[in-house]
Image (spheres, grey):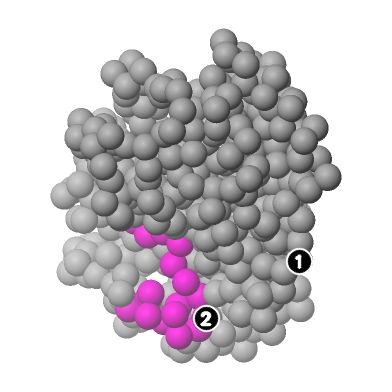
């Protein structure tokens, strides 16, 4: 039972709390599994409306604090999970004395009398990296759940807040939060062998069926502070990683056209087994421009752009990490927009988007454009975040968030030879805010593309299907 309503538990006793959980154990465990997917373990986690304590224990915090208005729930949780801390406290009067990595509200907003006041208090327990994770019931289910209560399949409850996504998004905005992602899940909340699996693992993630699901979820974060944001633009450092294979004619332009980014700009060339004189040109450019720029060079030990990007990121020392393709179809001059988006906190993964401005057929043939739009739609569906261009090579992330992503990479494994999807899927798994940054896409001036379109299109599709199993159909 998750509640901040002052009278909601007067109708039950300690034993009946456990009875209702056991009666709907499938639903509770599905909820706990979902939070386990969203929440990185071994961090500091606050749960508002912690009830019997099972969910807080399931996410495996390094330090876990659960607050709940119910003395009955508190006693049960304290006895069951002595490794966690529980308090009897009303979130509307909550005065946190520390910040947390995650704040969880599992179906709690339905019970809170003054949600805006509660969110104002919760805001004090958050830092910029904190993720607020809320689940709540789809209002379309109200008559079904009322009927379940009538026939004794659901605990009798006081009048609830039946809020839709727009209601909660508005309350979050008024409390200085912003939504990172939103979705729905769980189409059949009772356990019937095979039937539950089919409805919840096969049908529920599909468009159309998904809108009918019982549980909605929101991942949110606090809005960036404007004063701190402008300080970051001045003080943060930057590393630009430039993978280069058979791009000898573009190497010098990567330097001469590079803008100064933040307090210090580091440029890292990663050469990828070229058959032309790319490596010699990189060495020459480093020697010629070393008095103007901090230039590092490396020949990758593996194969593919993904490996080159990861090796470049390992060498990087900047606060902000930028990938710039050495074909210069995305102009270096536009990197300032990516750097600023990350530095001021407008997003946590900046994704280049080439489909805002007109694109010539020479730069992107019609068939490539259609394939790009298809993969952008598919990725938007998988990530619960709208992106318009999935295949632009220019992507930017802070070093701090990249290290979190790399530490969590084992969930997906080393599945991405390109490096783009690794960042997109990893960012979505961590609840990072992803935003498109419009760029003008221009034809290359030297060499030819290293991309084998049909072969790599099949690889991209396989990666999307793999990610679907790891993100949507879990």
Residue at point 74% right, 27% down?
Answer: 284
Between the residue at mark 1 and the residue at mark 2, the CA separation in whole angstroms equals 25 Å
The secondary element bearing badge 1 is classed as helix
Residue 360 visible in the shown view: yes
With 97 as the anchor, is 393 left or right in this view? Answer: left
Q: Where is residue 430 in the image (x, y as percent from the top left)?
A: 55, 49
Position above or below: 42 against 222:
above
> Is 124 rendered above or below residue 22?
below
Residue that mark 2 sits on: 176
Q: Which mark is residue 340?
A: none
Q: Name the residue under label 1.
A: 235
Residue 422 image offset from top left, x and y in percent: 52, 35
Left or right of 27? Residue 253 is: right
Residue 324 magenta-highlighted = no
Is 251 or 413 nearer to us in this picture? 251
Q: Please tell me which residue is depicted at 75% across the width and 73% down the height of the picture.
A: 98
- When the figure is inspected, residue 107 is found, relative to residue 407, above or below; the finding is below
Q: What stretch is highlighted in magenta?
A: 167-185
Q: Quadrant of residue 130?
A: bottom right
Q: Is residue 178 magenta?
A: yes
Q: Residues within 10 Å of mark 1 (few under 14, many from 20)?
A: some
Q: What element carries label 2?
A: loop
What residue is shown at x 78% (from left), y 48% (from top)? Answer: 292
């Amino acid at each position: 039972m998750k509640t901040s309503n002052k009278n909601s538990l007067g109708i039950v006793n300690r034993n009946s709390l456990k009875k209702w959980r056991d009666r709907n154990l499938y639903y509770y465990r599905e909820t706990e599994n979902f939070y386990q997917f969203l929440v990185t373990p071994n961090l500091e986690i606050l749960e508002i409306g912690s009830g019997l304590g099972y969910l807080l224990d399931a996410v495996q915090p390094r330090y876990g604090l659960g607050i709940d208005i119910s003395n009955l729930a508190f006693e049960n949780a304290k006895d069951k999970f002595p490794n966690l801390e529980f308090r009897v406290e009303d979130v509307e009067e909550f005065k946190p004395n520390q910040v947390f990595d995650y704040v969880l509200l599992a179906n709690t907003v339905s019970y809170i009398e003054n949600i805006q006041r509660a969110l104002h208090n919760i805001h004090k327990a958050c830092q910029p990296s904190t993720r607020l994770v809320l689940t709540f019931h789809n209002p379309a289910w109200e008559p079904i759940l009322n009927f379940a209560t009538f026939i004794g399949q659901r605990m009798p409850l006081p009048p609830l807040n039946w809020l839709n996504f727009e209601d909660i998004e508005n309350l979050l905005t008024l409390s200085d939060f912003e939504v990172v992602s939103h979705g729905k899940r769980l189409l059949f909340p009772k356990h019937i062998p095979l039937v539950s699996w089919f409805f919840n693992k096969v049908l529920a993630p599909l468009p159309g069926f998904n809108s009918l699901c019982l549980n909605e979820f929101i991942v949110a974060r606090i809005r960036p502070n404007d004063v701190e944001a402008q300080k970051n633009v001045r003080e943060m450092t930057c590393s630009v990683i430039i993978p280069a294979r058979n791009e000898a004619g573009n190497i010098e332009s990567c330097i001469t056209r590079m803008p100064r980014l933040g307090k210090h700009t580091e440029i890292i060339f990663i050469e990828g087994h070229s058959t032309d004189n790319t490596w010699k040109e990189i060495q020459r450019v480093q020697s010629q421009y070393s008095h103007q720029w901090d230039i590092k060079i490396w020949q990758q030990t593996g194969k593919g752009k993904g490996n080159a990007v990861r090796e470049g990121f390992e060498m990087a020392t900047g606060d902000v990490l930028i990938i710039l393709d050495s074909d210069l179809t995305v102009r270096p001059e536009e990197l300032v927009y990516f750097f600023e988006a990350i530095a001021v906190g407008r997003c946590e993964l900046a994704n280049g988007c080439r489909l805002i401005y007109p694109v010539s057929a020479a730069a992107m043939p019609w068939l490539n454009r259609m394939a790009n739009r298809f993969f952008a739609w598919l990725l938007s569906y998988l990530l619960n975040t709208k992106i318009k261009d999935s295949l632009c090579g220019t992507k930017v992330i802070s070093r701090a968030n990249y290290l979190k992503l790399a530490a969590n990479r084992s969930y997906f494994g080393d599945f991405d030879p390109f490096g783009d999807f690794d960042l997109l899927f990893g960012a979505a798994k961590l609840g990072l805010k992803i935003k498109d940054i419009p760029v003008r896409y221009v034809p290359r001036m030297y060499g030819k593309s290293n991309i084998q379109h049909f072969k790599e299109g099949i690889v991209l599709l396989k990666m999307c299907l793999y990610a679907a199993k790891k993100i949507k159909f879990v």
